[in-house]
Amino acid sequence: MSTKSEELKSIFDQFGVKGLNDYAKEKLEEWKSTPVNLAVVGNSGVGKSSFINKIRDMTVQQKHPEYAPTDVVQSTMKPTKYEFPDNKLIHLWDIPGAGTKEFSMQTYAKDMHFEKYDAFIILSADRFTENDGKIAQKIKDIGKPFYFGRTKMDQVMKNEQRERGDQFSETGTNEKIISDCHKNLGKAYEDNNIYLLCYEDEDSFITKQKKTFTFQFPDNENIKIALVKDLPDKVKAALVLSMAAKSKELIAEKVRQLQVRMIWLSLVSGACGAVPVPGISLAIDLNIVAAETKFQIKQLGIDGDAMSEKASVLGITSSQFHERIKSVAARDGYFKSHFYSIITNLIDFLQTYSGKNKTDDKMLLLLKLPAMLTAFAAEEAAESGMKLIPIFGSTVAGIMSATCTATMLKLMLNGNVAVAKASLVVSAGMEEKAG
């Protein structure tokens, strides 16, 4: 038996059904109560505000009170806090640069309270300096993760193209910038990644000769993935579940967190199933699955409102967008299995499902569709149930309830992930390359 199973069995043995149920519910809500503090370091004008808005998926058009202003020239004289829109415990801090008469390098870490931050992003819009290296060393001394970001890369690309004309190379320019950054930072950081950032994920530039260049900036997402992978588990969960799913890599990180939640939800269901009340287990299972499926849909950004927004960007109707998702899913081979019925039912359901829905009534109707129940029945669930036997012992009701919930949650998560990945493919206009 694993250490975690032993811990859960101990809780069950000491405190019974209620104790295990309370513990599982506490773990499910833990991400909401975990504070996260990320420091964005750099001199005025390097693009800290743009980065802070970008990582939170926030635009000026949203008119959100937590939007970091970018259209004014200001010199940050003290750390300025910005919250994530859906999680007020996650803070991005705009930190002023060091090595000035206001902030001596000798006392900088103490003045900026480095110890309170979980990670640091050091930004430069031109070239990194000796002071940037010194800041990184102070962060390294306290054992916190840090990342170097070279901002305003769209300007770099346009300038390089103007200068070099037909000799211009996007790859060559990226390599040159990274090499220069490493050179300026020194040998101590030659193995550190340099993330090449831009406010837009893609930008086009038309030359005087009417030739169009399109530049892509994948490091906008790569720096997020690096960040969440390096954070402690509790902090990682809070950040991942508060970020928008904009890439396959971030979807994968969300899936890992949602899979952990499946364990706790199965235990909640098992604890309820262990209560000898005839007929209560199935009802609670469906409610648990309905609520968590709703949570999954929000996390993966595939509710009706989000889909309509993506369709609008492409200049197509929501119905057309959903049909394209079905086409991508079919080419992925799902149409040959019962799993495809889950995907098609989900896609049809999501066209009219808003993330603002307060109740789970519509979700319950979806789960009770004959095609969905047939898919559930076709899924092998014995293994997931057996894993819970050491915890619930021979309490058959608990094992069966947990097994049923685990099976349903796994199928719904797989279906939602398939839709989310297909949505990314369609949004990128890459349907022809899918499969």
Image (cartoon, rainbow, N blue to C red):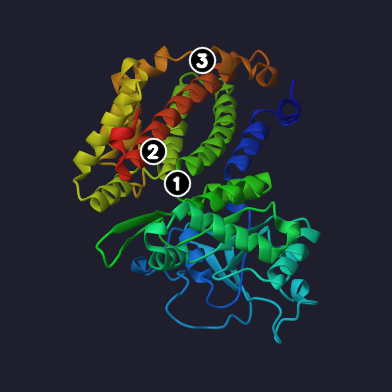
Residue 361: x and y in percent read: 33, 37
Q: Residues within 10 Å of mark 2 (few under 14, many from 20)?
A: many
Residue projecting furthest to the front: 167
- Do the CB atoms of the residues marked 2 and 1 lie less than 8 Å apart? yes
| Residue at left offset 52%, top offset 24% | 406
Question: Is residue 90 visible to us here?
Answer: no
Residue 381 marker: 3
- Do the CB atoms of the residues marked 3 and 1 lie less than 8 Å apart? no
Q: Amino acid at mark 1?
A: Ala
Question: Is residue 184 visible to us here?
Answer: yes
Residue 136: x and y in percent read: 72, 63
Which element is circle 1 on?
loop
Q: Residues within 10 Å of mark 3 (few under 14, many from 20)?
A: some
Residue 245 marker: 1
Q: Relative to 127, does residue 251 appear above or below in the rendering?
A: above
Residue 15: x and y in percent read: 72, 31
Label whose residue precedes the other's in the sequence (3 or 1): 1
Q: Amino acid at mark 2?
A: Ala
